[in-house]
Amino acid sequence: MNSIISSSLIAATAVSAGAENVQLPNIILILADDLGWGELGCYGQQKIKTPHLDAMAAEGMRFTQFYSSAPVCAPARYMLLTGKHAGHSYIRNNKKMDMPERRLANGALLYPGQLPMPADDITIAEMLKDAGYATACFGKWGLGVAGTSGDPLKQGFDRFYGYSCQAHAHNLYPAYLDRDGVPQLLDGTQYAPQLIADEMLQFIREKRNAPFFLYYATVLPHLALQVPEEYIKPYLDKWEEIPYTGQSYQPHPTPRACYATMISFMDRQVGRIFAQLKELNLDENTIVIFTSDNGTTFLGEQVDYTFFNSVGPLRGLKGDTFEGGVRIPFIARWPQKISAGTVSDFVGIQYDLMPTFAELTGVSVPPAADGISILPEMLGEPQQKTHDFLLWDYPGYSGQVAVRMGDWKLVKELILYQPDLPARLYNLKTDISESNDIAVQHPDIVAQMEEIILRERRKPEVESFRFGTYRD
């Protein structure tokens, strides 16, 4: 058999009861939190060291035009897991739930979580569980706490360990973590990213003899600026620092050094994954994907995104539908299947992962999914489908909608307050920084893309997510 096997052959062998010596591949999906497009060495970062992720790119495929489905946390994670684009998404913004204050035995406040996913949603985990996979999520969830319809244990995951509420994840030395729906009390001295990574590696070891799907939603490098003292030493005294005094998160005397350390700490855990896969002889039968939920945070007193060149030449940051808010790192590695050292300019988006994993395992794509499988692109095959368009529908930051169609990118802003404000149009092939609005010169393109917006945006079921014009 050729070292690069076809996606159709993978699907055929995955469902063939009589096939011999064929195993369903293990799937590891690593999701960073607020990691910008330019914050890894393999994407041009000069100051922050990420040797393990750089090695992953050298041993696999690095995508240069891959996108998050939303510019902030909860909707990005929802669309990734359900395969829906933003115009069809139930969750389109971060929405905190209200509940009476409750405290645990150690006095810690029990966090209420975000708007729960509906019970009838089908997630990647449910799809793969039905195909015989053991499933687990470690890290940040943000789509409903234990007991709600969004509880990860009700959405296809056998295991969950980490932060069920994203607001809780703003402290990396928490008083508790959620272990399979039950609060695990902590003393406030344990670094949660370390606990989560250790638990994640234990899952791999326990499930080494059966196909597994691991969703490792690391909380790094999202604020607050917190990291164990022993890890920050290599970055101390490297750069001038302006201490952060703690207006919105915990203060830190050396914010540049701490932020760089948080990314390097995350990179270290990725290295531990690959070391364990090799130790357990799982490396060649495991596809690993690394990406981020959205771009770098806009809180510049804590994260000096200009100093780190965090989004490279892109415009915008987290919360923006401009490229810096939604174009994210995406690396895929699968020894002997994905050619080492390849770079792809394929235009993909995270809601493509559900159909990709469906093709990979030979199962049917849930009917609500909007994406396309990118498995042919990863395997170097010629029959890769392409998107007619990508769509972002984000009610935050005064309301934003964006569409990418080929090299064209249309952005509409301030829809909540200035709904008649003209759309902006950019050609990303010649203007990656989105600095030259050419809408006036191309009214036909603008009209075509605005028709896509009108056609594809369904009215959200959640009242606070509704803004602008909908066909229905």
Image (tube, rainbow, N blue to C red):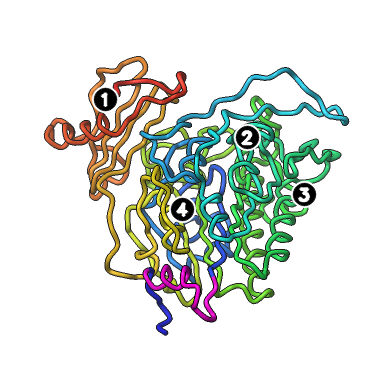
State the CA–CA distance, disc 4 to disc 2: 21 Å
State the CA–CA distance, disc 4 to disc 1: 33 Å
Please name the residue that numbered disc 2 is placed on.
166
Residue 82 image point, x, y percent: 47, 44
Give the residue drawn at x 18%, y 33%. 446
Name the front one of labels 4 and 1: 1
Label 3: which secondary element: helix
Q: Three-letter amino acid code at disc 1?
A: Arg
Q: Earlier in the sequence, mark 1 or mark 3?
A: 3
What label does residue 229 carry, if any? 3
Quadrant assignment for the N terminus? bottom left
> What are the residue bounds of the magenta stretch?
8-23
What label does residue 329 carry, if any? 4
Q: Earlier in the sequence, mark 4 or mark 3?
A: 3
Label 2 Cα crowd, 10 Å radius (few <14 / some 14-19 / many 20+): many
Name the front one of labels 1 and 3: 1
Give the residue drawn at x 68%, y 74%. 280
Label 3 Cα crowd, 10 Å radius (few <14 / some 14-19 / many 20+): few
Label 2: which secondary element: loop
